[in-house]
Amino acid sequence: MFSTHLQPKTVITAVISLNFLLFAGLSPAQAVPHRSATVQQLVLDDLSFSFVPPEDSGQPRTNRAGGRRDQLCNHSTPLPSLTLLIPPTNQGLTTAQHPTFLIYIPQTSAQNVFLKLEDEHDNYLYHTTIPLPEGSGIVSFTIPNTAPALELEKYYKISLAIMCNTALDPNDPIVEGWIKRVESDTSFSSQEEQKTALELSAAYASNGIWFDALTILANLHQSQPDNPDVTLAWEEFLQSVDLDSIQDAMILNPLY
């Protein structure tokens, strides 16, 4: 559970903006989707995209990253190296039953990545082999609806291994992280349709819901690469968890 109380400044700005639009003869239903550039900027100025870790995040969960440390399938690994986009605690929250993960992949000769989802007791829930796009950059993976849904308040381990050959090898580069599904606050859910994507991502970030905020911002960053507000939001979000080294990387495949 988490709360999404808006800051007083944001509430005042929203009330003033709505009253102005009503005075102009617009209904609330007309006002929300057609904000003027000035009103939209006032809202954006009040948003923070810095990730705020949840209070009950607990001790950091180790990332048993392994495999070849100095090369990625016979390619020298430059900085940044193979990276799962996740906070420094190596764990993150989501409200999604089938979440999306993002990983930065440097230049490599590998053609596939092996994705594995397990519970805390190392029981397999889902695994698949996914072809890699060409070039270095950020790649997204979404757990399909055919896979078991994540249960509430349970931790799961996601593992992503770069397959240097046609079969998995213990020396293949691998990154791992943990995810827990939480229930969305009722009051928050009721506001989702009224919020813009940027406002929604800021709300998730400020409430410690890492994967939901990340997915929204990544979608915006990919679909609106020349939008300065989206770029600044993306950069602020990644910088807040020390992922600024990959903030300029291209997202190579569509987010589903």
Image (tube, rainbow, N blue to C red):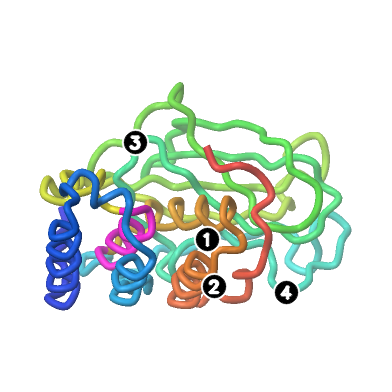
Mark 4: give few (<14), some (14-19) or many (20+) Cα within 10 Å: few
* Residue 79 numbered tag: 4
**Which secondary structure, mark 1?**
loop
Residue type, numbered disc 2: Leu
Residue type, numbered disc 4: Leu
- In the image, residue 171 sits, relative to residue 227, either above or below, namely above
| The quadrant where residue 20 appears | bottom left
Query: Can residue 90 be spotted in the picture?
Result: yes
**Residue 35: x %, y % from top left:** 32, 57
Label 3 to label 4, Cα distance in Å?
Answer: 33 Å
Mark 2: give few (<14), some (14-19) or many (20+) Cα within 10 Å: some
In this picture, which residue range is highlighted in magenta? 196-207
Q: Nearer the viewer, residue 38 or 179?
A: 38
**Which secondary structure, mark 4?**
loop
Q: Nearer the viewer, residue 253 or 53?
A: 253
* Residue 140 numbered tag: none
Mark 3: give few (<14), some (14-19) or many (20+) Cα within 10 Å: some
Q: Earlier in the sequence, mark 3 or mark 4?
A: 4
* Residue 85 numbered tag: 1
**Dots 1, 4 in contact, CB < 8 A:** no
Predominant SS along the magenta part:
helix
**Residue 13: x %, y % from top left:** 18, 72
Label 2 to label 1, Cα distance in Å?
Answer: 8 Å
Residue located beneath label 3 in the image = 97
Residue located beneath label 2 in the image = 243
Q: Earlier in the sequence, mark 3 or mark 2?
A: 3
Q: Is residue 201 magenta?
A: yes
| Left or right, 224 with reference to 130 | left
Q: Nearer the viewer, residue 63 or 122?
A: 63
**Residue at 23% from the left image edge and 40% from the top image edge:** 152
**Which secondary structure, mark 2?**
loop
